[in-house]
Image: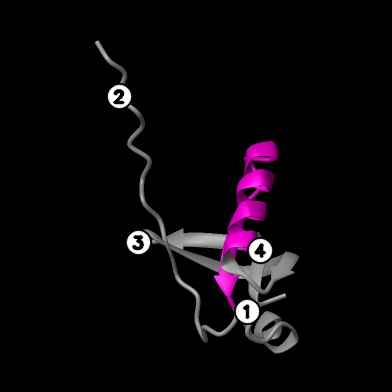
Amino acid sequence: MNWVNIRDIYPDRWVLVEALAAHSNNHIRTIEEMSIVSEYDNPKNAWASYKKLHLSEPTRELYVFYTGNEFIEVIEQPFTGIRGLQ
């Protein structure tokens, strides 16, 4: 599904989605195709599900979006890591 379809099917909902087809350009992630994992009334519940699923399956490309937004934008930020004490 694309974002327009998801917005039509799930109006004014929080959705947990998995990117199925995506690409990056200039630190912007464009998601062409995605699937709905779950839908929610409350963003806290959506993020709790995201965290739980991401911990168990970290290789899946998951996002939480609000379908009231006409457009979605994912800005990539490079992971700098955690510095240990020396």
Residue nearest the viewer, comparing 26 with 82? 82
The image position of residue 2, as x and y in percent, is 66, 77
Establish if 15 lies above or below 62.
Answer: below
| Other residues around mark 3 within 10 Å, as few (<14) / some (14–19) / many (≥20) | few
SS for tag 3? loop
Mark 1 element type: helix
Report if residue 70 is visible in the image: yes
Q: Amino acid at mark 4?
A: Leu
Which residue carries the number 2 mark?
83
Asked if the residues shown at circle 4 and circle 3 are in contact, with their CB atoms under 8 angstroms apart, the answer is no
Image quarter hosting the N terminus: bottom right
Alpha carbon of mark 1 to alpha carbon of mark 4: how far?
12 Å
Which residue was labeled with disc 3? 26
Which residues make up the magenta segment?
A: 44-66
Left or right placement of residue 63 versus residue 6 in this view:
left
Disc with the residue nearer the chain's start (1 vs 3): 1
Q: Which residue is mark 4?
A: 16
From mark 2 to mark 3, how far is it between C-alphas? 27 Å
Mark 4 or mark 3, earlier in chain: 4
Q: What's the residue at 64%, 61% (across, down)?
A: 45
N-term-proximal mark, 1 vs 4: 1
The residue that label 1 is drawn on is: 3
CA gap, disc 2 and disc 4: 31 Å
Q: CA distance from mark 2 to mark 1?
A: 38 Å
